[in-house]
Amino acid sequence: MSHSHINVKDDEVDIVIAALRSDLTSFLNEWRPIFSRFHLIIVQDPDLKEELHLSEGFNIDIYKKSDIDRIVGSSSSTVFTGYSCRYFGFLVSQKKYIVSIDDDCMPAKDKDGSLVDVVAQHISNLATPATPFFFNTLYDPFRKGADFVRGYPFSLRTGVTCALSCGLWLNLADYDAPTQALKGGQRNSRYVDAVLTVPARALMPLSGINIAFDRELVGPTLFPAFRLAKEGKFRWETVEDIWSGMCAKVICDHLGLGVKSGLPYVWRTERGNAIDSLKKEWEGVKLMEEVVPFFQSVRLNREIVKTEDCVLEVAKQVKEQLGQSDPVFTRAAEAMVEWVKLWKEVGSS
Amino acid sequence: MSHSHINVKDDEVDIVIAALRSDLTSFLNEWRPIFSRFHLIIVQDPDLKEELHLSEGFNIDIYKKSDIDRIVGSSSSTVFTGYSCRYFGFLVSQKKYIVSIDDDCMPAKDKDGSLVDVVAQHISNLATPATPFFFNTLYDPFRKGADFVRGYPFSLRTGVTCALSCGLWLNLADYDAPTQALKGGQRNSRYVDAVLTVPARALMPLSGINIAFDRELVGPTLFPAFRLAKEGKFRWETVEDIWSGMCAKVICDHLGLGVKSGLPYVWRTERGNAIDSLKKEWEGVKLMEEVVPFFQSVRLNREIVKTEDCVLEVAKQVKEQLGQSDPVFTRAAEAMVEWVKLWKEVGSS
C-alpha cells in the first residue's frame, strides 16, 4: 500500500521553533530549502534577554516574554522557560499540524546524500494511517514499496489516524547525561530507513527534539508540566518531553489514535558539557523509575472521549498515585490542569 | 551499549533446512561461506519422492520420510509434510540455538555490498538482551554504536533474555497471495538497518522463512499445528508459522522472554504463481480474523512456568474458545498437545 497523494496544504502546517540562543541565522539558512514555504512560530526563551537575529525571507511570527505575559498572564508564563517555551507556540498556533525542531538541529542527509525533507516526512507519517493493534514486520505498510505482510488481518489494514510522529537524530543522539558523559565520543551514524507505529500499550520515551503532531487531536497532551528542580538549558537536563510524551501515548492508545517513530532524521550538533550536567540529570533519571510504571498502569474510563478530559483524568491519577512520593509530581499534575485551562482559553480559539 | 563478545560456539548451533525441492546444490553453494562451519539438519518433505542433490563439504544430517516414521511413528509423521517438515528438525536437534532458512532464499547483501552473515546476526540478536517492556526509539540498544535514549529507565536497561529472532526478506517479501497477486511486480528493496524488540503484549505475524530461536527456551512453542485444509507448497498457502509465532509471542510475554525482529535479511527468490494460489489462501486470510483477537486475549495463569505447560494451556483455550467455530482450530489444539508429547519424548532427550 502506498499513498502517493498526501492532501495536506502548506497553510495547514506551523513550524514551531524554541529559540534558546539569540543567533538563529545559520539555523534558518540551513533549513531554508525546507522551511521557507511554511509559516514559522519562533518562541524566544523568556530567560534569553538578547535580541533574536533571524534571516530574511521567512514568514515568521515571533513571541517574546512580553507576548507570553500578555497572552497567558505573568503567573502562567513561568512554565514557558527554557526548552518549554515551544509549548507556547503549540498553544497559539491555529494550524492542524505542528512540526517542532530544536534550534541545535540541522537538516540531515539520507542514504543517497539528499537533504531530508523533515516536514514532508512528518506530514506523510501523520497523513497516512497508523497500525497500533498488530505489528507489521516490514514497518510502515503505507510507505512506497511496502505493504502488509502475510498473516496481517485484513480487518486491521485500514489502520487508525496517526496523531503523533517522532523523528530521530543523526550525529549527537538524544542520550541522557550519564550516557553522554560516559561515551562522549559516541555519534549516531546509523540511518535506519524506517517508520513504524509504536504498538498500542507499549510506551516509549518521546524526545521533543524533532516531532510533529495533529494539533487538533493531541495538542492538549503536549505540555510543559514536569519540571525538574534543577532543570537546565540542555536537553539532557530536561524530561518534560518524556513525561508529556508518555501522557500523549497513553491517551492516543485510549482514543484509538496512532503514534509513529523513526524517520525523519535531523542532524544534531553539539551543545553543552554532559559531565557538568551529570549532577542535575540524576534527578530526572531517578524519577523515571516511578514515572514509567505509573504510565504503564494508567487506565482511562471509556466514557472519557475528549483529549482535554483525558489529560485532566491523568493529572488526577498523577496526584493520587505519585503525589505523596515527590512534590515534582504534584506540581506536574497542577500544571497539567492549568495547561488544559489555557488550551481551552487560548488554544481552541 | 554494545556486546563485542558473543560467547556462542559454533557447535551450539544447528541450521535446519526444509527441503521442498530435490536439488539443493545451488542453495548450499551460495550459503557455503556462512553455513559451512555449522552442523546442518536437512529434512526432506515426505511428499518429495526424488533423491536430494546436495553439495560436498558440509556437515549434514538428512532426515527422510522413513526416518520421520521411525522416530515419531507413522501416525504422527503426517504433520511433517510441506513447509512443516522443518519442525521435525527442531525436534531432533540437540543444540541450544536453531537457525532455519527456507530453501528458496539466498544470502542477501547489506548496504555496503557485503554478504549478510545471517547466522552471526541471528545469534547476536539471541545472545544480547531484549527490551520488551519499554520501546527504545533508537532500536536495539545492544548493537554497536547504539544505546538507550534519554528517558529510558535504568532499571529496565538490563533487559531480558531474547528467545526468538525473526529476520526479513529482500526481493520477494513474505506477502499473502492476494497482495502478491495484486502487486506481482512489487519487490522489496528497502534495507532497514535495524533490529528491534517487539514490545510485550504486541503481536506480530511471525514468518518462518528466516528465523532463529533458543531451542531450550521456546522450542516447544514452534510447531506444525495449524494446517489449512488446502495447504500447499508455497509460503502464501500456509499460515502454520503465523499461528505458532503468535503462540510463541504470547508465551514469551508470559515467561518474560524477548522477541526481536528486523535484521538479518535474506534474498528471497521467486517460486509459484500467486494467482493460482488465491483460491486456497483465502481460507488462511479469513481465519486470521479470528486467530488474532484470540491470541490477543490469551492470558496464562502465573503458576504455569514451563514452556511445554504454556503450550498445553494455550491449546486448551484454543479448543474452548475457537473449537466451535471451525474444525481447523480443534485439529490445531490437538496437534499442539501431540507436539508437546513428542517434544517430551524426542526433543528433550
Image (cartoon, coloured by chain):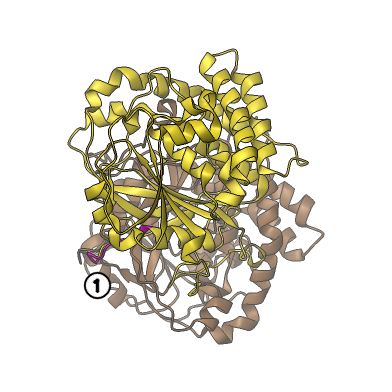
Chain colours: A brown, B yellow
Magenta region, residue range: B112-118
User: Numbered disc 1: what chain?
Assistant: A
How many neighbours does mark 1 have within 10 angstroms: few (below 14), some (14-19), or many (20 or more)? some
Total residue callouts: 1
| Mark 1, residue position | A29
| Residue A181 in the image: above or below residue A156 | below
Please name whichever residue, B286 or A215, is drawn nearer the observer in this view of the structure.
Answer: B286
Question: Measuring 28% from the left and 77% from the top, which residue is drawn there?
Answer: A26
Q: Is residue B87 left or right of residue A295?
A: left
Q: Is residue B165 left or right of residue A310?
A: left
Residue A245, picture quadrant: bottom right
Pinpoint residue B249: horizontal percent, then vertical percent: 56, 42
- Residue type, numbered disc 1: Asn
| Residue A251 in the image: above or below residue A272 | above
Please name whichever residue, A72 or A340, is drawn nearer the observer in this view of the structure.
Answer: A340
Please name whichever residue, A180 or B290, is drawn nearer the observer in this view of the structure.
Answer: B290
Question: Measuring 50% from the left and 44% from the top, which residue is drawn there?
Answer: B90
Pinpoint residue A228: horizontal percent, then vertical percent: 65, 70
Indicate whether residue B114 is drawn in magenta.
Answer: yes
Residue A165 shows in the view = no
Pinpoint residue B239: horizontal percent, then vertical percent: 43, 30
Pinpoint residue B238: horizontal percent, then vertical percent: 39, 29
Q: Secondary structure at mark 1?
A: helix
Residue occupying the far right of the picture:
A324
Residue B183, picture quadrant: top left
Indicate whether residue B160 is drawn in magenta.
Answer: no
